[in-house]
Image: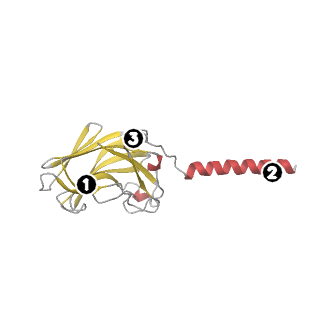
Amino acid sequence: MRTLVCAVALLCSTLFSCSKKEESVPEVITPVAKGFTDYTIQAGKQFADQNGYIPVSLTSLKFIVKFDSTAIYATKDPANQGDINKLYGFSDNNALHQDFSSRFGWRWVNKRLNLQAYIYNNSIRQYTDLGNIEIGPEYNCAINVKEKLYEFVLNGKITTMPRTSTTPTAVGYMLYPYFGGDELAPHLFHIFIKPL
């Protein structure tokens, strides 16, 4: 009888620990192709660990992005679930990014991974939906800088946003993955980006 009780206790312990692990630890998909940087955002932080100051002057920013299952998250306040996290882009007009900038945004909303075009012109923020993507595949992205607009390209589909910067090229600095919004990262995020 004592052996039976021990066996049942061991079985229950194994079942509960496996179940708990699957719910709390997201599975990471390692990128297959070389040339990707694994941008990590630590739990309780907002900036990517690889966030550095790199000045730019460019007419186009092209890259490939790939998300793993760490992109699935729930905010503490359900009202914040629709907030747009920042993916990749640049400041413009030789100014701070909250004055002039252009970048892709991302969020987990309605059980889907969603990308957004996200810009500032004269400190006024605008954004528009670029569509839902899947976890795992690689997506080709670009921001083309024109005189009066930005062209956001997602796998060949072009969406335009206004540009009021006066510099002929985007002059500023690179912008990297960032979580938020109003909240800090609920867990470790991995975002894989390969510049083209």
Under tag 1, what secondary structure?
strand
Crowd tier of the residue under label 3, counting other residues whose Cα lies within 10 Å: few below 14, some 14–19, many 20 or above: few
Q: Residue at point 44% right, 49% down?
A: 71
Image quarter of the C terminus: top left
Report the residue at 15% width, 47% height from top: 146
* Residue 6 disc label: 2
Q: Which secondary structure, mark 2?
A: helix
SS for tag 3?
loop
Q: What residue type is labelled 3?
A: Lys
Which of disc 3 and disc 1 is earlier in sequence? 3
How far apart are labels 2 and 1 at the CA level?
60 Å
Q: Please indicate whether residue 22 sits to the left or right of residue 149 in the image.
A: right
Q: Which of the labelled discs sits on residue 34, or is there none?
A: 3
The type of residue carrying mark 1 is Phe
Question: Marks 2 and 3, Cα distance to the nearest angstrom?
Answer: 49 Å
- Residue 44 seen in the current view: yes
Decide: marks 1, 3 in contact (CB < 8 A)? no
